[in-house]
Amino acid sequence: MERHSIRLMNIKIAVSGSGRVVYPRLSCLLSILLITGGLATPALPISAQSIDVAKLDKARILKAANQYLTEAPITITSSQSPRSAGGLHDFFSEGDYWWPDPQNPGGPYIQRDGMSNPGNFNEHRRALMRLSVHVPTLVAAWKITKQPQYTTHAAKHLRAWFIDEATRMNPNLQYAQAIHGRFTGRGIGIIDTIHLVEVARAIEVMEGSKDLSAADLVRIKQWFTDYLHWLTTSKNGTDERDAKNNHGTCWVMQVAAFAHLTSDQELLKYCRERFKTVLLPEQLAANGSFPQELRRTKPYGYSLFNLEAMATVCEILSTPEDNLWKFELADGRSMRRALEFMVPYIRDKKNWPSKPDVMYDDQWPMRQNSLLFAGRSLGRPDYIELWRTLPADSTVEEVIRNFFIRQPVLWS
């Protein structure tokens, strides 16, 4: 099998012809998921409300968390691209599907939809993904065991990213998903911080520990408040808000998660209404599919991704008085219908009616948390049993980047 190599956090790794990452040692960035055990525990008959996620995932969580205790925080200040128009503390990434023009070397990049350019600067994304894996896992380990070493270490990451002046990230994504020769940053780059959604959840859970002082919590929440202001007022932010596909969904998901952390009731209300009046009406077809995702070159992966984001929106925003899981449009479109469309193809992908994804088609589905969330909220134990049979973790960078809820125990 043909292999090529790439650099990941300054560590050389091999990539097989199928797209799988092969690691020389466990200290590599994405080996953080390799050690967690991969497949979930085989399913046993359960009811929709009886699932004990902590018991199910305990061994997986502790194995990973104990490894992460030995690894120091890494923030975006550890690397910088000469192509970035920002400074040391500004997050920078490049558009995935943009490549050098063979007819104009050195000129503006051209698009190849669905084909990720391995020459892009991705170190800030990798650092952010690392944060989004380490902190939720450490906090999940604390939630299960109450052993303080886990939150003590998680707090080091949070201070490095959001407090310490030498290493913190500026609370904006002004320079995300730039395109060489065209844009120094774009609104769609805001999708890069979906990896802060579970970090925000972990911070909320961690408030029950003693490892973040009151002053630390104030400063961390102020970072998220500042980021929310940028997300909701900047041109890049409003461009992303108005996207008609998964980008618009992920804007609502992020704003909801960060508003929940900072107790911004007005933004939470705004996100609930946007789900009802914009996301479902504009994105969900009568049969429960997402047409904007189906027309892409990775229709299966994008459909799963958007369903996962919408499910997370419902999980964050639903209240006893306003349950988004059970909300329906006048014509019956709802999250229930979205699940009914997609679940048969999660259960048996061979029946998928659209074309296969151009890359990483064999890497999906994962242990999609939309199944767990919907199973609990809609009374569907069959969804939870299916969830339990799927892979919980991956070592493939593209999967890690698009699979952003990894510790469901934090959402129990």
Image (tube, helix red, strand yellow):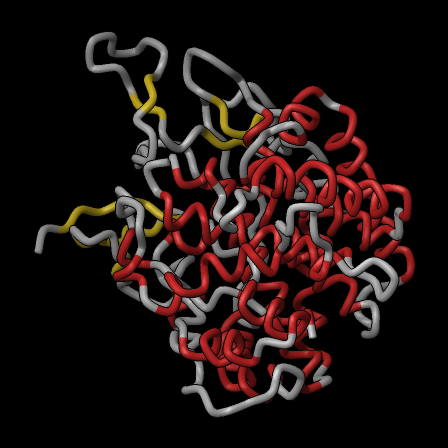
Residue 359, x across and y down, in percent: 27, 45
Vertical order, 206 against 188 (above or below): below
Q: Residue furthest front?
A: 331
Please identify the quadrant where the C terminus is shown.
bottom right
Please identify the quadrant where the N terminus is shown.
bottom left
Vertical order, 13 against 153 (above or below): above
Residue 295, x across and y down, in percent: 38, 35
- For this view, does 203 lie left or right of residue 175? right
Q: Residue furthest bottom?
A: 45
The residue located at (71%, 71%) in the rendering is: 152
Q: Is residue 315 visible?
A: no
Name which quarter of the figure residue 201 lies in: bottom right
Question: Which of the two residues, 320 or 102, is positioned nearer the viewer here?
Answer: 320
The residue located at (34%, 56%) in the rendering is: 396
- For this view, does 218 lie left or right of residue 253? right
The residue located at (46%, 41%) in the rendering is: 123
- For this view, does 103 lie left or right of residue 69? left
Q: Is residue 78 visible?
A: yes
Vertical order, 181 against 384 (above or below): above
Please state the total of marks drawn on the protein image: 0
Question: Which of the two residues, 211 or 133, is positioned nearer the viewer here?
Answer: 133
Vertical order, 384 against 107 (above or below): below
Question: Which of the two residues, 214 or 52, is positioned nearer the viewer here?
Answer: 52
The residue located at (80%, 50%) in the rendering is: 220
Name which quarter of the figure residue 243 lies in: top right
Residue 276, x across and y down, in percent: 73, 44
Q: Residue furthest left?
A: 1
Residue 290, x across and y down, in percent: 49, 43
